[in-house]
Amino acid sequence: MNARRVVITGVGVIAPGGVGTKNFWNLLSEGRTATRGITFFDPSSFRSRVAAEVDFDPEEHGLSPQEIRRMDRAAQLAVVSAREALADSGLDLSGADPYRVGVSIGSAVGATMGLDQEYRVVSDGGRLDLVDHTYAVPHLYNYLVPSSFAAEVAWAVGAEGAATVVSTGCTSGLDSVGHAVELIREGSACAMIAGATDAPISPITLACFDAIKATTPRNDDPEHASRPFDGTRNGFVLGEGSAVFVLEELEGARARGAHIYAEIAGYASRCNAFHMTGLRPDGAEMAEAITVALGEARLNPEAVDYINAHGSGTKQNDRHETAAFKKSLGDHAYRTPVSSIKSMVGHSLGAIGSIEIAASVLAMEHHVVPPTANLHTPDPECDLDYVPLTAREHRTDAVLTVGSGFGGFQSAMVLARPERSAAA
Amino acid sequence: MTTRTVVTGLGVAAPNGLGTTDYWAAARAGKSGIGRITRFDPSGYPAKLAGEVPGFSAGEHLPSRLLAQTDHMTRLALVATDWALADADVSPADLPAYDMGVVTASSSGGFEFGQGELQKLWSQGSQFVSAYQSFAWFYAVNSGQISIRNGMKGPSGVVVSDQAGGLEALAHARRQIRKGTRLIVSGAIDASICPWGWVAQLASDRLSTSEEPDRSYLPFDAAAAGHVAGEGGAILILEAEETAVRRGARVYGEIAGYGATFDPAPGTGRPPGLRKAIELALADAGADAADVDVVFADAAAVPELDRVEADALSDVFGPHGVPVTAPKTMTGRLYSGAAPLDVATALLAVRDGVVPATVNVSPEASYDLDLVVGEPRLTEVRTALVLARGYAGFNSAMVVRA
């Protein structure tokens, strides 16, 4: 139906363990973890006190004092990642029609960190019902409506086409990129700056995940607290970060001699229509998304060389998606390496889908599959090859990456070398 | 070649009328829903007026289990969806689950719910925060809850924006219809009329401080001095035309064209993007400017923004070249909910040949607009253009056609 094919030509990542794509890949390929006891504030009153924090100094990365003041941390991360991606792509937007360059940024929880801090002040520590506007920061509106994230990225790169924030919970980082692909395919844009960001490590986020016991209480062993697919796991580790990509139409990218990381060959999203936080163990809706995404990519299940799992480290998730892989890929699920980088960089909610796309294309670049760290004790109900502990050299020409989130959203994306994908 | 995407159901929750019938009667009569805020005491804040949805008792429509876990705006959205599906004569249980999706827009999620939980966190302690906070506040809540309540498993989405996102959600829904999904629930309901939401809205510096409802929101008037914020919006049912015709559905009209741009960074000297968004939407609809019978304006009521919109309309349609109206002068600006409500209003204008008026406004002559003021205008409407702009420079335009 659509002749236009969309490829990734630039990558920018800020993940726990280091700013920039290079630091990110070093962490993953070495199987190191970036989870630690929370340092941003005193977490002693919380059930879960572990997080994957980014050591990030916005001034060091070129943001001016006023930019820093008006942006929530999540926006800062997105802007710096977008700049890295654009530089990496070598794409010169100065000669482009700015209306043909768009922005699509995913975020699950927007400016939670800024809102939490500001609420505390205007309510004077929760004492005032009628919170006091005279104590609010002048840019509070940018926190209220996080479409400001897309605005900041658009300004940073000079884009004047469609600009969007996509917010489908923990699949936001796949869905924002999927949205960008659709805009290029339909001809609304020739290039998109697309990715996702979240900076949720804040008391209110900890409190709400504490309340549903979604995050791990493994506070005495923070470096090994994120344990997807391990029999001893007991919840996810909250993270933060950002990944942004430059997406272009394939022929244009080839014509300018761009380095092509991967084609975004297929994408689909479905809902479980079941529960805002619960998952049915059969993984049916994620399996459906995977099957549709593979169909769009015109790839057989056997073409998948590596699965980048959602792998949050909750029992219900790990079993849900293991079932989904078996249902959608059949026997091939048992022959395919599956891993969760959340074991190393934690779960950065809306951002992680894009960070996992970055991990996927870097696996293709290096023909190295990142491991699932901390996986020592197999769970009998999770019986696939989860690449425990150490990265593996593995020919990787097509990757399936998936996400699952609150609200019931289930998304799948297929990344493949353009010459390998049969999409016409 | 491309399938036409049509609207077959409307569910409205507006400050001047709950339900499509009440809203449309009020809009035609020029009845405003703007008044002094009742949900909290606004006397300590510089802006004291809002458009609150009247007469909504969630418990009459929703089970108590859902009331405990939802913000006010989610309750409105769930009920508006029920009404839209009934209006479309669709029973979701009769359709395959993967053939139905939900695409909504949101500006600030369940912000009032969030204020309550933030207060518990900081005044009582983290262990007092509700287990529902993890999803009652976030932006995806309405799509998720609508999907669950109606068993809809198809392609879904959520966009975040204050005003422009309402059209973008509809455009995204149309994309999914074109790719083969049978039915999409789309649109937006927004609300953050709580003290914490109010303080955050005040930071935009665009809220009117007038205390007189009929002098408070005056777009394209020499006395324009900001807008009144409101709550509510509209939920629409979208289907492919063939599907709708085959099942004998009543069709309100077509989502015919869409265009979106973002304004250049301040200081670049490049022109604002609204005109381009209009041109893109017209081209996408295969329509000429001369085909457009009425424009539903964004109507910021900030003089420089009114000027930008008036200039864009003059550039595309000529001075006084097309009737322009802003029924949102009767509701206030509803954030993401505003544009879906304008699309619903445009479809009702198509149905009945009535363009509701822009109330209370004396048009400033230099804008060169044919603004529909005073009485509603009785005229055949076959094609309407709806505009929506978001804070910081988001522009979106949608063409709706009979």
Image (tube, grey):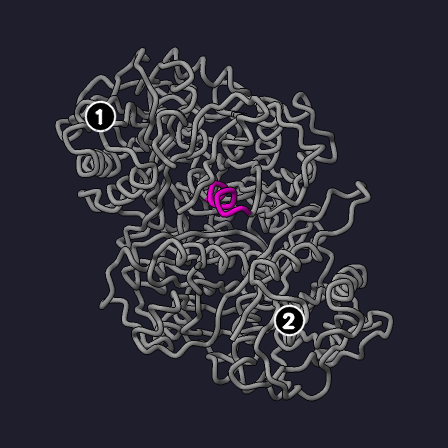
Instruction: Tell me the mark number nearer the camera, choosing from 2 and 1.
Output: 2
User: Disc 2 sits on a residue from what chain?
Assistant: B
Up-down relation of residue A259 to residue A99 (above or below)? above
**Marks 2 and 1, Cα distance to the nearest angstrom?**
58 Å
Up-down relation of residue B291 to residue A85 (above or below)? below
Most extreme residue toward the right is B366
Callout 2: SS: strand
Q: Is residue B226 left or right of residue B120?
A: right
Q: Main secondary structure of the magenta part?
A: helix
Q: Is residue A215 left or right of residue B2?
A: left
Q: Position of residue A158 (x, y in %)?
A: 69, 37
Q: Which region of the structure is painted magenta?
A: A179-187
Circle 1 packing at 10 Å, graded few (<14), some (14-19), many (20+), is some
Residue located at (74% from left, 77% from top): B371
Q: Position of residue A387 (x, y in %)?
A: 26, 18
Q: Which residue is mark 2?
A: B296
Q: Quadrant of residue A315?
A: top left
Q: Quadrant of residue B186?
A: bottom left
Q: Quadrant of the C terminus of chain A?
A: top left
